[in-house]
Image: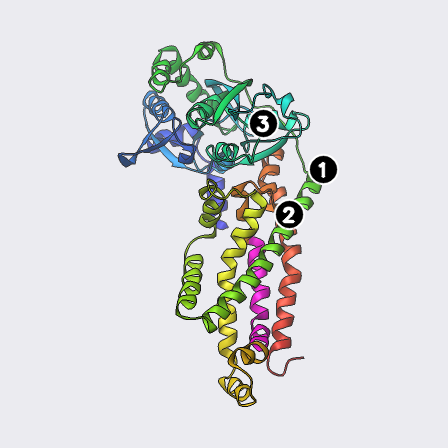
Amino acid sequence: MVFGLVAAGEVAGGADGLDRMRERGRLRWGGDVQGGEPYVFQDPTDGARLLGFEVELAEALARRLGVRAEFVQNDWQTLVASLERGDFDIVMNGLEVTPARDGRVAFTRPYYTFSETLVVRRETRDVESLADLRGARVGTLQGSLAADLLAAAPGVHTVLYEGVQEPYLDLEQGRLAAVLLDDIIANRYALGRPGLRAAGSVGEGVYAIAVRPDEQRLVRAVDEVLGEVIESGELRLVLQRWGLWNDRQLALATTVSRPPTPVETHLTAAQVQLFVRAAGVTVWVSALAMGLAVAGGLVLAVTQRLGGPIGRGAAQTYVEVFRGTPVLLQLYVLYYGLAPVLTLDAFTAAVLGLGMNYAAYEAELYRAGIGAVAPAQTEAALALGMTRGLAFRRIVLPQALRVALPGMANDFIALLKDSSLVSVITVVELTKQMTITAVDVRSWLGPGLLCAALYLALSYPLSRLARRLERRLAPGGA
């Protein structure tokens, strides 16, 4: 914390941002490679090299500033927050000028004008505008201008994504009625698919470079060299190389930057209600997934104990695969990878993904519990005439579950927190709601504290239950 405060103090109170940039000799610009082509992406023939029209623009800006460009990878959703804490000098990654960002950053003049393209399945013939999508699920990118347009459209149910390809995959699978995103994204990731078509354009927007508002000298310097790149025709050549030049870009030469608009925002009662609703989703997903994990883990443990060679091998393979791979990867594979053969809705995929993953851990708990039961008890049951299966079911298994109960309670707490991962497949649970609200109120502190308080309120009773079970089930406990 001390080092963080010192670093923050240096950013806020030290040398001017323009002076720091020139002293280090690098213009550090933030972006997200996951955004893909044509913004910034890895060269398929050389993984150490970046390509994209924004890469070329960054190099042109740095050259005129007398420094070299240095790309800094950062998740797109948190680019503005990372800029505010001083992780880089500027943000340039298809960052749209929206009301949510205006007031937090200073924008330069625009460097690209885009239109919002509505994409539907090819067989859909009755959709030409957002008015035709009342009551329908429409996908878009979280934090985008398209998300603002959908939020203002009456009756439209907005589904938020963190990547640009995923909404079109869901549209193909019938999970969405339409997708609204920038025309650059639609042209690259949607309109080449045989099952999709453009239904029309819904509004326009611009990309601009974001700088911290207190770095006015840096803002003016970047804005000035960007103007030189535009007026010299270099930007036009860059856009033409990437197939992005069109008549809308002619207005860039006459568009100027604007100062940020001061705003005062705070958490509202409606936003708190959204947090409570998201907490309910978290509890519901976690409870169902834990129920699946308990049942699945029991089947795996019994199979490992009583199954034949094939059954034991299959159960052990399941446990090793699901314990040895990240649950995030498993969610991606279940929701997107298996979509051509098994199309699941997001909620079902979330429950199945978490439940199947935790079943592997529950199986190991039960296996340890079974091992804790003295073999003499099984021998005594057999001496009384019980079969081996009956002795296992009536004598060994109840005691094993009793031993495993505290561990199961701890796993439920862990599952409750791991449920935040299901946001990658569009489930709006507690953590996802926090990130959405943080953008709306231009702050991460208030929403983050509220999110943490709700998680604590959900997990604390479970932790108390786990401790009570441990005391009750301990030798001599009561």
Viewport quadrant of the C terminus: bottom right
Determine which quarter of the picture holds residue 265: top right
Q: Which residue is mark 3?
A: 103
Residue range of the region highlighted in magenta in the rendering:
397-417
Q: How is the image coloured?
A: rainbow
Q: Is residue 170 above or below residue 251?
A: below
Q: Is residue 416 above or below residue 376?
A: above
Is residue 146 or residue 447 the one in the foreground? 146
Q: In the image, 257: left or right of 45?
A: right
Q: SS of the residue at dot 1?
A: helix
Q: Is residue 169 above or below residue 431?
A: above
Q: Which residue is mark 2?
A: 281
Give the residue type that dot 1 points to. Answer: Ala
Q: Position of residue 182 (x, y in %)?
A: 49, 23
Q: Which residue is mark 1?
A: 270
Tell me which label, 3 or 1, sits earlier in the chain.
3
Q: SS of the residue at dot 2?
A: helix
Q: Is residue 326 magenta?
A: no
Give the residue type that dot 3 points to. Answer: Gly
